[in-house]
Image (cartoon, helix red, strand yellow):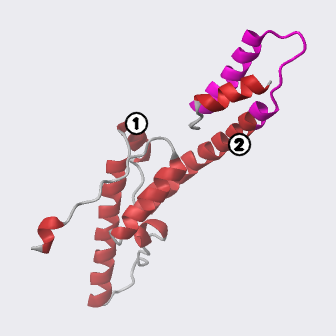
Amino acid sequence: MASENFVQPAIPCFDGHYDHWSMLMENFLRSKEYWQVVSIGITEPLAGVVLTDAQKIELEGQRLKDLKAKNYLFQAIDRSILETILNKDSSKQIWDSLKKKYQGTARAKRVHLQTLRAEFESLRMKMGESVSAYSARTMAIANKRRIHGEQLEDVIIIEKILRS
């Protein structure tokens, strides 16, 4: 049977890198056909509006999709983050809240990383500076870049020191 070979894709876990996680999570939710309720939300009927049976069925289907999307979002985040969004009623509210909180942080990290890259590239040995002092300054900037998530190989640092 074909269903026996089906592999359930893993839910992308939020690791603090919002841009990467949101791309993976959006793709995951699209594959489940839940992205529309996350990105657009559900339009609830106004009070007193009478819905046809078909509209009621459609609304219930949208609510179920929203509930399933919320479930995936809850599974993707850790408890400390979950506690900050428990008051959100829909998957759209959860998504928008996470985006507002973490996308700015990711943007700030990128800007800081760009500054560190420029600082690293313009780094030169000062007149009278010892090799060990220059090496320590170079390593300090390289380590800051690594802390901010950049993959920086040792060979690049060594070449930088040797060129100076």
> How many marks can you see?
2
Q: Residue visible at 58% across and 33% down?
A: 153
First in sequence: mark 1 vs mark 2: 1
Give the residue type that dot 2 points to. Answer: Val
Q: What stretch is highlighted in magenta?
A: 118-147
**Which image quadrant is residue 30 in?**
bottom left
Reading the image, the residue beneath label 2 is 111
Q: Residues within 10 Å of mark 2 (few under 14, many from 20)?
A: few
Disc 1 on helix, strand or loop? helix
Coordinates of residue 65 in the picture (x, y in percent): 31, 69
The residues tagged by marks 1 and 2 sit, at their Cα atoms, a distance apart of: 26 Å
Coordinates of residue 32 in the picture (x, y in percent): 32, 68
Task: Give the overall secondary structure of the magenta segment.
Answer: helix
Q: Which mark is residue 64?
A: none
Reading the image, the residue beneath label 1 is 80
When the figure is inspected, residue 68 is found, relative to residue 40, above or below; the finding is above
Position of residue 145 in the picture relative to residue 18 (left or right):
right
Q: Residue visible at 58% across and 49% down?
A: 103
**Which image quadrant is residue 129 in?**
top right
Q: Is 16 a magenta residue?
A: no
Q: Which of marks 1 and 2 is in front?
A: 2
